[in-house]
Amino acid sequence: MGDTTHWISEHDVVSVLGLGNALEALRAGFAQEGDALAAELEKTMLGYGDHATLHALGAAFTGFGLAGVKVWTHTPGGADPVLCIFDTRTGSLVACIEAFALGQLRTSGTAALATDLLAPPDASVLAIVGTGKQALPQVAAVAQVRSLSEVRAFSRTPERRESFATTVADALGLHCRATSSVEEAVDGADIVTLVTRATEPVLLDPMVVPGMHVNAVGAIDLERREFEPVILSRCAAVVTDSVPQAKRLSSEFRELYGPGEGEAGTGAWQAVRSLGAVVASVPLTRDPDDITLFKGMGSGIEDVALGAAVLQRLGIGPGSAAEPGASGTPAAPSDALLAVSRRGRAEVAFRRRSPARP
């Protein structure tokens, strides 16, 4: 591709990458991390001005020949993230990818991967606590890896949970029931997904029963807590997509395991496994009564793995079909591939997988 740097729009991302192939790209990316062929650049943040923040995180994949960093500034007026991908052989900038839709795929796809690895194989009832922007992608993600007979939804506002139940039924073809409490939502559920901005736990220890799997993906800073930390002590497997970030920013983990520094960093924290290690290892054996928990913190591994998949499907960069000697047929890029459209937005179409998983 020479020295060309490509600008890839949101529309190009969603034209070549859906939730199903995002899941497989994430699986491949975390496998590379587990095999020590990839390493994450931990998230860093700078606060400035009037409640604004500047963020950066990334990863380097020696296996893919790519390194990347996602940057954005979150302001009262919104955010406009971009993922910059570099060729590790030459240091050249391969592409800049508008990363709003990519973020939806990354958060929900990672939860789907964790659910596939940790939840009971026959899990069929999902409780979702929180009905904000990430809730529908989270339901769609679980439906990619488990055949769901029922979804229960809770949020603090009755109108919002009723509206969300209707949206799940219309968009995903799943039976969804709005509940009046967290207890009602999780009672009898096989999988519980927490996607809230809670500052006090909403999932309490007595609500968690043998055989349950929990995805906790909403609380990613020290001000937020979604579940009682004592639940972790009952888990047969505790997994996170970024152990370093959990040590710094998960209030639930830090309360039970300590701050993750000094002896605490090599002691109690040994109970926590990285998602990359789980993907790369022999599949977990799960007893019927085992409780499992996945804590999603967000990792540059996810962003760059998805960015690499977009480039590969567009025939761009190291290892793509467009390179001399590479095999395969690249996906046809849209007419907007090289057009700079800073404010373009494209929503991911979240639909139930068909046919359903047996």
Image (cartoon, helix red, strand yellow):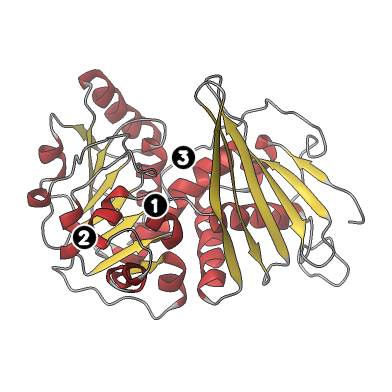
Mark 3 is surrounded, within 10 Å at the Cα level, by few (under 14), some (14 to 19) or many (20 or more) other residues, namely some
Mark 1 is surrounded, within 10 Å at the Cα level, by few (under 14), some (14 to 19) or many (20 or more) other residues, namely many
Can the viewer see residue 124? yes
Which residue lies under the disc numbered 3?
Answer: 350
Depth check, front residue: 276 or 179 = 276
**Amino acid type, residue under disc 1 in the picture:** Gly
Which element type, helix, strand or loop, lies under badge 2?
helix
* The quadrant where residue 103 appears: top right
Q: Farthest residue in the bottom direction?
A: 282
Residue 46, position in %: x, y? Answer: 56, 38
Which element type, helix, strand or loop, lies under badge 3?
loop
Depth check, front residue: 108 or 142 = 108
Marks 3/2 in contact by CB < 8 Å: the verdict is no
Mark pair 3, 2: CA separation: 31 Å
Residue 215, position in %: x, y? Answer: 30, 52
Mark pair 2, 1: CA separation: 14 Å
Marks 3/1 in contact by CB < 8 Å: the verdict is no
Which residue lies under the disc numbered 2?
Answer: 232
